[in-house]
Amino acid sequence: MTREEIDRALKAQAAENVRLAGALLEMDTHPGHQLLRDAALTGLTARRWSTASVEMAVLWAQFTAHRRLVEQAQRVRDRRIRPTPADLDEVARLLTTPVVELDADRLPVDGPGPVAETVGLTTLVDRMNASYAQVIDVLTAADRAWTAIAGHLDPLTMRLHEAEQLATVLGAHRNEVERIAGLVGQIRRTGLTDPLGTDATALTELDADLDAIIADLTELDRVRRGFDTRLERLAFRLTELASARGEAGQLAATVRTKIADPGLEPLPDDYTDLRLRLEELRATRRPGRWQQLAAAADELELATADALTAVRQHIDALNGLLERRSELRGRLDAFRAKARQLGHAEDLDLTALHKAARDALYVAPCDLAVATVAVNRYSEAVRERTGVPSSRRPADQKEPR
């Protein structure tokens, strides 16, 4: 080798030693190293760390041997301003020939002892690079695994505490919450001692299970917090129902005195049953029953709304009968005025038809079917006397109101 080649080789090995020093320092301060070094490891992590820790010790020993030889070569090169051929040969030997003696464990042999192989500095650096990559892979994998586990465990533990409190207050999902708590505790223990052997996806599944439980518990808690208000609202609706039923009863009595055979079915007596169901809800209000109580309250609200609707429809039907009678009376009076306006006040046939219609309408109770027929006969007779039968009336000619 020429002096320039030797100087370049020496400079390259010195740069490699500086790089290796920085890499090994990074390896020693790696978060994964801090985690594995201080933990009581088990399982896969213990096995991989056992191998990696040996590799780290070998790396430091080989690095020390590499530095010692590079420094030795530098000292030989610096002996003279103008090195002799012997000096250059010595430097070349140290840099390019197998000079590092290694035992069976790949540790540099320092002093007398069995030598398994002898390698050059370049080969030594290549081996150190490969070993370093293996060690960093273990350290990084352990750090990532623990970070993933801790990233799930911390928020999961907080939410688990929330779920435990709600489950205790509500008396619901306690077994499910205890199951998840047990699994979380188990994963926490194995995650600390064997992060590489712990399946973090199990935490994702537990997250999903806990989400569903907390959602249900939150809904039950909403039911619990608003249950008294809901019962008050139900009681008010039942008061409305009772009032509507009273109104319907009074109106039905009026209709029965004024309308013969109204043809309406009597209202079912559902108020008493609904009131008893409300009292039962109040009596069974206790932890552990919020799901059943919420369902029962839903059913009671629906039944009360249906009952109110039925009563109001019944009232509308009763009012419709009275309105029908009033409408027939209005039509009769209007056609009577029309007949007089046209000069038929003394028409005996019209007078008789009017009397029949009036007698049918102004009697209590009134038969609406009979009265409707009588009013129609009278109105048709009035139309006939106008000369325009009802079937041929102009579109703009309206009946008298």
Image (tube, helix red, strand yellow):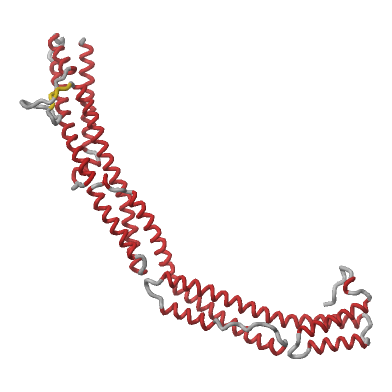
Q: Position of residue 317 (x, y in %)?
A: 68, 79
Determine whether, in the image, residue 289 is placed left or right of residue 181.
right
Tell me how many marks there are: 0
User: Compared to 401, does 154 lie above or below?
Assistant: above
Residue positioned 30% across, 43% down in the render: 144
Q: Quadrant of the N terminus?
A: top left
Determine whether, in the image, residue 371 is placed left or right of residue 44.
right
Determine whether, in the image, residue 47 is placed left or right of residue 395.
left
Q: Position of residue 298 (x, y in %)?
A: 49, 71
Q: Position of residue 269 (x, y in %)?
A: 56, 83
Instruction: Name the one closer to the observer, 278 or 377.
Output: 377
Instruction: Name the one closer to the observer, 152 or 25.
Output: 152
Determine whether, in the image, residue 212 is placed left or right of residue 354.
left
Image quadrant where residue 333 sits? bottom right
Q: In which quarter of the image is the C terminus?
A: bottom right
Q: Residue furthest left?
A: 112
User: Compared to 249, does 136 lie above or below?
Assistant: above
Residue positioned 34% across, 58% down in the render: 159
User: Compared to 386, does 189 lie above or below?
Assistant: above
Residue positioned 90% across, 77% down in the render: 383
Image quadrant where residue 281 sits? bottom left
Q: Where is residue 294 in the image (x, y as percent from the top left)?
A: 45, 71
